[in-house]
Image (tube, rainbow, N blue to C red):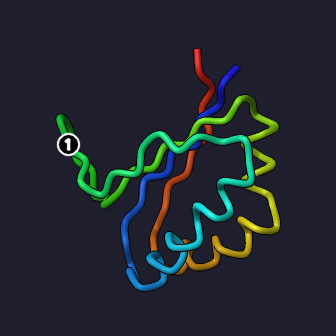
């Protein structure tokens, strides 16, 4: 069953987030994931959404998602993401 990681970001130090972003695909491409969405201009159709960007990644299963999320390579670059953006990150299962 596919698993998705959804990140909702509010930039706090854009230069740090940009550094993370510049290194992201080099790390991400080593794993079994697929980047589906990275939208810095989402359109809010209903409700309040005080964020700047949405990212959605697809993985074949929970183990693959966790392998990426917990990898030393991702943990190394995620320092800049955490310093550069307030994030809500979710893992959800597909149907």
Q: Could you tell me which residue is drawn at 58 percent across and 61 percent down? A: 25
Residue 44, picture quadrant: top left
Q: Which quarter of the image is occupied by the C terminus?
A: top right
Q: Is residue 43 left or right of residue 12?
A: left
The answer to which of 50 and 32 lies nearer the viewer is: 32
When the figure is inspected, residue 21 is found, relative to residue 13, above or below; the finding is above
When the figure is inspected, residue 74 is found, relative to residue 59, above or below; the finding is below
Q: How many marks?
A: 1
Q: Is residue 44 left or right of residue 55?
A: left
Residue 10, picture quadrant: bottom left
When the figure is inspected, residue 34 is found, relative to residue 52, above or below; the finding is above
Q: Could you tell me which residue is drawn at 19 percent across and 44 percent down? A: 43
When the figure is inspected, residue 50 is found, relative to residue 6, above or below; the finding is below
Q: Could you tell me which residue is drawn at 79 percent across and 57 percent down? A: 70
Q: Is residue 48 left or right of residue 70?
A: left
Q: Find residue 26 and report its horizontal and vertical position in percent.
A: 64, 64
Q: Find residue 9 and report its horizontal and vertical position in percent.
A: 41, 60
Q: Which quarter of the image is occupied by the N terminus?
A: top right
For label 1, count other residues whose C-alpha is less than 10 Å away and answer few (under 14), some (14-19) or many (20+): few
Q: Secondary structure at mark 1?
A: loop
Q: Residue furthest top?
A: 95
The answer to which of 19 and 69 lies nearer the viewer is: 19
Residue identifier under label 1? 44
Q: Find residue 6 and report its horizontal and vertical position in percent.
A: 51, 44
Q: Could you tell me which residue is drawn at 78 percent across and 40 percent down? A: 64
Q: Find residue 89 and report its horizontal and vertical position in percent.
A: 55, 51
């Amino acid at each position: 069953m596919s698993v998705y990681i959804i990140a909702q970001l509010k930039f706090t130090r854009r230069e740090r987030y940009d550094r993370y972003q510049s290194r992201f695909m080099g790390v991400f491409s080593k794993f079994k994931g697929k980047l589906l969405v990275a939208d810095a201009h989402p359109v809010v159709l209903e409700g309040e959404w005080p964020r700047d960007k949405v990212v959605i990644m697809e993985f074949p299963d929970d183990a693959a998602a966790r392998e990426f999320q917990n990898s030393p390579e991702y943990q190394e670059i995620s320092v800049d993401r955490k310093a550069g953006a307030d994030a809500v990150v979710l893992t959800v299962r597909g149907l």
